[in-house]
């Protein structure tokens, strides 16, 4: 498949996806080309739709369709007093599936140092987090960032940003393996990290 510029470009792009290298990228592309009507065409269409219509909620950071309300923010029947701050949507999914936490989520969309532009505070939706704390009667913010340098730097930055609110701030317990990313933790470790979370206000 070499020497076809369109395909070479596609191989480079698909190789950047998690878990895929050039070899698997080629197999994927070949499968799509051999199934033009059933795979290639609808995939091209769907990718275009996702690009056009899927965006981050400006309040909580969850992905949403621009045609629909955000799933995290919409359900007014649920009333919680805690917000759990995570780096990525996959972290929210991991915490939800462990059933340890009942409350709202706030998705930063990354960490301070992984966002290389100058709009970090805006990107992490910190202003929105402060508004949510004030408007939703929140009594505790749980920082559930990864046990990486970036994750911990970000947690400290958020703690500092919230110092003028009256909210209790806690952080997941140190039992997290160093370098541990929330989404990769098993339920047992996650549950114990939540139960033993550390109060940062004292
Ligand atoms: Zn939302």
Image: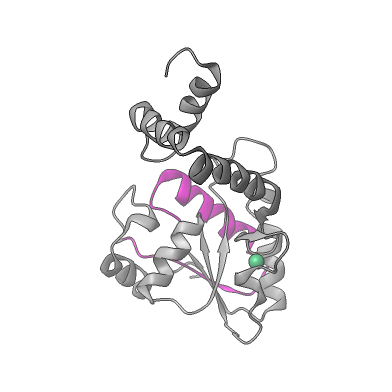
Q: Residue at x 28, y 63 (%)?
A: 186
Task: Please give left or right for residue 201 compared with residue 118 in the image.
Answer: left
Q: Residue at x 58, y 55 (%)?
A: 108
- Depth order, front residue of 76/133: 76
- Depth order, front residue of 182/10: 10
Magenta span: 145-174
- Depth order, front residue of 65/177: 65
Q: In which quadrant of this rendering is ligand 1 seen?
A: bottom right
Q: Quadrant of the N terminus?
A: top left
Q: Residue at x 65, y 54 (%)?
A: 54
Task: Please give left or right for residue 139 compared with residue 199 in the image.
Answer: right
Q: Is residue 145 above or below residue 138?
A: above
Where is residue 66? Give x, y as percent: 72, 59
Where is residue 148? Give x, y as percent: 40, 47
Task: Please give left or right for residue 12 compared with residue 139 in the image.
Answer: left
Q: Quadrant of residue 173?
A: bottom left
Q: How is the image coloured?
A: one colour
Q: How many marks?
A: 0
Where is residue 177? Give x, y as percent: 28, 54
Q: Residue at x 66, y 83 (%)?
A: 76
Q: Is residue 158 magenta?
A: yes
Q: Is residue 24 visible?
A: yes
Task: Please give left or right for residue 168 compared with residue 166 in the image.
Answer: left
């Amino acid at each position: 498949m070499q020497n076809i510029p369109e395909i070479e470009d596609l191989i480079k792009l698909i190789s950047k996806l998690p878990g895929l290298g050039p070899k698997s990228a080629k197999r994927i592309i070949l499968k799509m080309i051999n199934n033009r009507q059933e795979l290639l065409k609808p995939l091209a269409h769907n990718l275009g739709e996702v690009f056009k219509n899927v965006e981050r909620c400006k309040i909580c950071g969850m992905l949403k369709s621009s045609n629909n309300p955000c799933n995290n923010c919409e359900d007014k029947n649920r009333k919680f007093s805690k917000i759990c701050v995570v780096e990525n949507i996959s972290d929210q999914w991991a915490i939800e599936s462990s059933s340890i936490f009942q409350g709202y989520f706030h998705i930063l969309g990354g960490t301070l140092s992984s966002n290389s532009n100058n709009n970090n505070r805006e990107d992490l939706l910190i202003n929105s987090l402060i508004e949510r704390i004030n408007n939703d009667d929140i009594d505790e913010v749980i920082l559930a960032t990864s046990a990486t340098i970036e994750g911990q730097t970000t947690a400290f930055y958020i703690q500092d940003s919230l110092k003028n609110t009256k909210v209790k701030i806690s952080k997941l317990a140190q039992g997290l393996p160093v370098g541990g990313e929330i989404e990769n933790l098993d339920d047992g470790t996650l549950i114990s990290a939540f139960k033993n979370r550390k109060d940062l206000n004292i």
